[in-house]
């Protein structure tokens, strides 16, 4: 009984978070949407954000993500990476500065204009108590069953779904239970179905075991092509091929460059990479002992 109560409480908290998010959207001023973005580039102009007045989480962030490029955001935990990710799709609005999509301030776009262009997968992807099919279809309610299956295949989750008692008709929480990594793949399937030209992923492999991580990375490879892609990462080996890497430390942008450039510079990113490599080596040695 206690276990069931805990599950219900966790679901209630997740649902409450969703409601708070939507209420915040409703309270935000809805712009006229007179101008469409010229492309899928993203610009962060003198960006700053505070959850509590006078205590900045992000300060003076200036960056440009070229259309069709892959940008990775890295840094120590708790120093603003997820907040930065939330600002791009307007889950949060900046305290100061501007986020521009295709040259247009995000606050000057209607939500239809914004979310036709920007998709996002965050580490706490929530599944509703619906069929698996309808959970994926939340991104595009008019999608056909064939489109849903195609998205699930691309997200490397189709085989797992077919093993459920009722396949795609299985209900999350009844005859469909998913690990954290599997939930991430379902969220990626939603994004594939949405087909937004800009995609923000926040710690997509945060809850993944090694098998799930490999599947998620394969799913992400399906998403990257032709999109402006922003990924918040803590598993650094997944972002070494990014077009640019932004290093955040204490809420400030301290380094920008490719993986090779930042290693050559020998600053905080290079030190973080070395610590990460040492951790990976230690984990491997423990596994084979």
Image: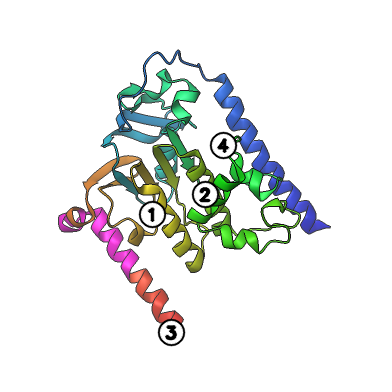
Relative to residue 105, is residue 143 depicted above or below? below
Q: Closer to us: mark 4 or mark 3?
A: 4
The residues colored magenta run 262-277
Q: Are marks 4 and 3 in contact (CB under 8 Å)?
A: no
Q: Closer to us: mark 2 or mark 1?
A: 2
Cα–Cα gap, marks 4 and 2: 11 Å
3 or 1: tag closer to the N-terminus: 1
Q: Position of residue 259 (x, y in %)?
A: 23, 55
4 or 2: tag closer to the N-terminus: 4
Relative to residue 252, is residue 35 depicted above or below? above
Quarter occupied by the N terminus: bottom right
In the picture, measured across the screen, residue 16 lies left or right of residue 78, that is right
2 or 3: tag closer to the N-terminus: 2
In the rendered image, residue 159 lying in the magenta stretch gets the answer no
Cα–Cα gap, marks 2 and 3: 37 Å
Q: Which residue is mark 4?
A: 140
User: Is disc 2 placed on a helix, strand or loop?
Assistant: helix
Q: Position of residue 73 (x, y in %)?
A: 34, 47
Residue 288 is marked as 3
Cα–Cα gap, marks 4 and 3: 45 Å
Cα–Cα gap, marks 3 and 1: 29 Å
In the picture, measured across the screen, residue 167 lies left or right of residue 5, that is left
Residue sitting at x 48%, y 45%: 192
Q: Are marks 1 and 4 in contact (CB under 8 Å)?
A: no
Residue sitting at x 39%, y 45%: 79
Q: Position of residue 42 (x, y in %)?
A: 32, 33
User: Is disc 3 placed on a helix, strand or loop?
Assistant: helix
Relative to residue 55, is residue 226 depicted above or below? below
Q: Which residue is mark 2?
A: 151
Cα–Cα gap, marks 2 and 1: 13 Å
């Amino acid at each position: 009984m206690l276990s069931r109560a805990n599950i219900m409480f966790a679901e209630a908290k997740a649902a409450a978070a969703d409601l708070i998010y939507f209420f915040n959207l409703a309270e935000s001023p809805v712009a006229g949407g007179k101008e469409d973005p010229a492309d899928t580039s993203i610009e962060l102009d003198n960006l700053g954000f505070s959850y509590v007045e006078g205590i900045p989480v992000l300060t003076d962030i200036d960056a440009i993500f070229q259309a069709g490029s892959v940008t990775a955001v890295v840094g120590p935990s708790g120093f603003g990476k997820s907040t930065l990710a939330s600002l791009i799709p307007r889950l949060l609005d900046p305290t100061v500065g501007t986020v521009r999509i295709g040259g247009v301030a995000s606050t000057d776009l209607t939500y239809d204009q914004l979310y036709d262009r920007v998709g996002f997968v965050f580490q706490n992807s929530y599944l509703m108590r619906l069929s698996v099919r309808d959970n994926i279809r939340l991104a595009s309610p008019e999608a056909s069953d064939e489109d849903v299956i195609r998205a699930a295949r691309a997200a490397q989750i189709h085989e797992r779904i077919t093993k459920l008692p009722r396949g795609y008709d299985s209900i999350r929480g009844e005859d469909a239970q998913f690990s954290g990594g599997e939930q991430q793949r379902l969220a990626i399937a939603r994004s594939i179905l949405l087909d937004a030209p800009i995609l923000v992923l926040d710690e997509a492999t945060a809850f993944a075991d090694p098998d799930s991580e490999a599947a998620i990375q394969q799913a992400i490879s399906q998403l990257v092509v032709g999109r402006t892609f922003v990924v918040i990462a803590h598993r650094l080996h997944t972002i070494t091929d990014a077009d640019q890497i932004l290093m955040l430390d204490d809420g400030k942008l301290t380094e920008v460059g490719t993986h090779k450039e930042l290693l050559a510079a020998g600053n905080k990113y290079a030190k973080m990479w070395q610590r990460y490599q040492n951790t990976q080596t230690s984990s491997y040695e423990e596994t084979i002992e």
